Amino acid sequence: MIHPWGNTNMQRNVDIAIIGAGTSGLNALSEVRKTGKSYVLINGGELGTTCARVGCMPSKAFIQVAEDYHRTNVFDRYGIEGQQDLTINQQEAMEHVRDLRDIFVDRVMGNSTDEMGNELIEGYAQFLNPNVLQVGNELIGAKSFVIATGSRPRIPESWQRFGDRILTTDDFFELDTLPKTLAVVGMGAIGLELGQALHRYGVKVTGIDQISQIAGLSDPVVNRTSIDILGSEFPIWLGAAAHIQEQDGKLKISAGEKTTFVDKVLVSVGRIPNLDRLGLDKLGISLDSEGLPPFNPNTMQITGRPIFIAGDTTGDRPILHEAGDEGKIAGYNASHDEILPFKRKPALTITFCDPNIVTVGTPWSELAERADIAVGEMRFGPVGRALIMAKNKGIMRLYAEKTSGKLLGGAMIAPRGENLGHLLAWSLQQSLSVHDLLKMPFYHPVIEEALQAALYDLWQDLEPHTTPLRELDVLRED
Amino acid sequence: MIHPWGNTNMQRNVDIAIIGAGTSGLNALSEVRKTGKSYVLINGGELGTTCARVGCMPSKAFIQVAEDYHRTNVFDRYGIEGQQDLTINQQEAMEHVRDLRDIFVDRVMGNSTDEMGNELIEGYAQFLNPNVLQVGNELIGAKSFVIATGSRPRIPESWQRFGDRILTTDDFFELDTLPKTLAVVGMGAIGLELGQALHRYGVKVTGIDQISQIAGLSDPVVNRTSIDILGSEFPIWLGAAAHIQEQDGKLKISAGEKTTFVDKVLVSVGRIPNLDRLGLDKLGISLDSEGLPPFNPNTMQITGRPIFIAGDTTGDRPILHEAGDEGKIAGYNASHDEILPFKRKPALTITFCDPNIVTVGTPWSELAERADIAVGEMRFGPVGRALIMAKNKGIMRLYAEKTSGKLLGGAMIAPRGENLGHLLAWSLQQSLSVHDLLKMPFYHPVIEEALQAALYDLWQDLEPHTTPLRELDVLRED
């Protein structure tokens, strides 16, 4: 006898199943909705994006307080008196950070999933076969899938025995009080942002990374300057892996010849894509050593399957606006018959340390070997506005094709680097040349004048270099 | 008998005579030098640009201190304690401002006129006839001329009797101590910048303007919001002209129904072009009521004469980068046989109050009557990064052609408005549309996201509004 509630009845069939309701999943959803096709959105664990819960937003709130507090170090030269009596109440500061975080999490959730009804399924999804997912007791059949399951912080296995003395961004913002001493392992964006801010809150911080580049900088000049600037605030040990032992109730952390004792270790050595519990083995796809399936970054399609992947899950470009774009591409292609390749935006990374570290376009590592690359450089020491702001530390380096003058990319550690990065990324998006850029308006006195100076320096390095530069176009009388 | 040192011998003849060694004169000089032609640069009064001596640079230094001091008002909510015991030593602050100013003046002079020898003539020039200038005892004949004599603050004649109690930017930065009470007459860029900063230094400030627009804002919504934001810091009286009387040793200043007593009045009601002593009557040109000759803003040529005018002297666009462009155009055309019309940059004005007030492109006053204009708006209240910075006050309004979507201009009062203004001005320079702009990378969380939101709002107002917006281009397979 066939039970009336048997498998075939229990399976719910939709056009598209989106797994993950974070940034990329929600962006995929918005594209799917435009088509009017049927869908489900499946989410395991807490609702709310990585960005709002434990990422961009609380970290910026944490940094803002540190930056304002640190800024008071210039007061003496400005004639502002009483700075030495300022103190920071860490507990109140952390509460302020969490208050803001809660606002952002509420807002993300309010915007997206509140009115979804039974199209939102809470639970962890697993492929039973290439066409069917299991979520708890429910079976979901779909014509196409979007995998947008995000990532989680990576912790070396041997360190897990140190329990809550090992912190990641998942628990960091829940701290009521800050430790007195702390090591940050991993000098990427997150490690630098939180490490510098913690130092400014009064924590004795040591930064450690096994490689010699910080913030992912492949430009050796910008990397060197960045290490000098940030390393003058707190010690940064580079080039040797960190080891931890317990000793006298403290954590003894060492790297190469160096050793220090700390209360806690903040681990920021990257994130693991949440793919391991998805049952990807049922899809018959070969996965790489990280457990990642092969995919096309312009279609987000997993090779040869009606399955699309987006956001941090891909292990690539783990930043919000890219996760959004990937979600849109995946959502579009999951809900259309013709799979379209989309143009990706020029790379832009911002580390919100102070000064900001920014990379745009093609990284130096891909250009260093080429003979046809011109380089322009500007240090912020003499930049008028930077001097006025008492923020005249930093360097900008720009790369262009020597003959065409086409801008290719750049790297900087710079005051208002986040804003300068947008000007450069927008210019790259439009394939502008150095000549085009030198025709743009630069007000005075603004930080953008440092970019102008770097562009003049870059122009000097172009070939052929025969005709004088003309910063204004002749008006055509059409 | 003809004296061997007679007139014809005493006259020195050159190809080009540049009158004025400020920003536009020096830019003209750089273009003239490229041609290898002979020239003189004549300068009356102090060397050094208006910008470095009494303009952009010292004002920004003055503002920076005020902004940092004012910023401490957020400390309480951040858990930073002791803010209430901070004080500002006005005398030290003014010394800091002058120290920076001296650095900038030295730098301008070092860069330009130091090595000029007898091509630099110090003295005031006057036309004897359309081909010859007199400077002291010297006669200079030239084939063409560049007039770049700058401007000076305007003071109503009836107020001159109040002597040193009437301040302009010419003497403001020389003050050792600040007055206890002060009125600022003129709520343009300079009046707003210095008025707000003075208030933040602890001076009791009243701002007054006879018109109802501040910072030159013709957009009524941005103007209203700006008045609300800035007026919540210090009183701003608009719409009635100021009158001053002496009473009980104080200055009694009134406008309409309102009256207050102040120690000093800072007058910032515009600047007068320095044309009155040039002997322009010898040129046989008809001058307008301001004493200005007619000129073409694309060639900078005074109609029908081999004479070119540039910089603040023109009474138009009195901002440094425009003065630089005008100097370049004037210098180019003064030293070439064919007179070329050059394309001017999109308008960009920045008032460096806090938040910044910025206008770009076509002002609202030129668009308000047109039926084919779309408007987009974003308030900064909910902008994530602005909220984190505790700077979520402001509004941005953008204008575009309804059918083509071409961006035309905008106005804002906004945190980091100066940086957002550059993104918009660069976009206008390239004639970008709203669709183009929505394809640009916007990082997260950044102030640029407010611009993105304003663009989405603007896009909603475009016509036809039938196809869904696609933020990513399809990759063409060439």
Image (cartoon, coloured by chain):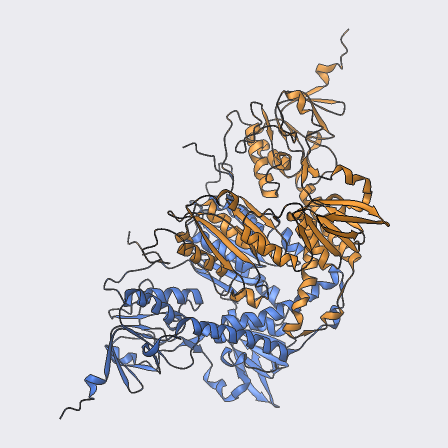
Chain colours: A blue, B orange
- Decide if residue A409 is in sight here: no
Decide if residue A287 is on the left or right side of residue B298.
Answer: left
Place of residue A311 in the rendered image (x, y in percent of width and height, measured from the top left):
39, 70
Placement of B302 over or under B182, stated as above or below: above
Tell me which corner region of the image, top left, top right, bottom left or bottom right, holds residue B43.
top right
Quadrant of the snapshot with the N terminus of chain A? bottom left
Q: Residue furthest left?
A: A1
Placement of B322 over or under A233, stated as above or below: above
Front-lying residue, A43 or B13: A43
- Decide if residue B150 is in sight here: yes
Decide if residue A253 is on the left or right side of residue A34.
Answer: right
Tell me which corner region of the image, top left, top right, bottom left or bottom right, holds residue A42.
bottom left
Q: Residue furthest right?
A: B248
Place of residue A101 in the rendered image (x, y in percent of width and height, measured from the top left):
52, 74
Placement of A87 over or under B2, stated as above or below: below
Decide if residue B89 is on the left or right side of residue A42.
Answer: right
Decide if residue A266 is on the left or right side of residue A67.
Answer: left
Place of residue A43 in the rendered image (x, y in percent of width and height, measured from the top left):
37, 79
Front-lying residue, A131 or A435: A131
Placement of A234 over or under B299, stated as above or below: below
Q: Residue furthest bottom?
A: A1
Tell me which corner region of the image, top left, top right, bottom left or bottom right, holds residue A328.
bottom left
Place of residue B270 in the rendered image (x, y in percent of width and height, measured from the top left):
67, 41
Q: Residue furthest front?
A: B257
Quadrant of the snapshot with the C terminus of chain A? top left
Residue drawn at point x = 42 percent, y = 58 percent: A346
Residue drawn at point x = 50 percent, y = 65 percent: B445
The mark total stands at: 0
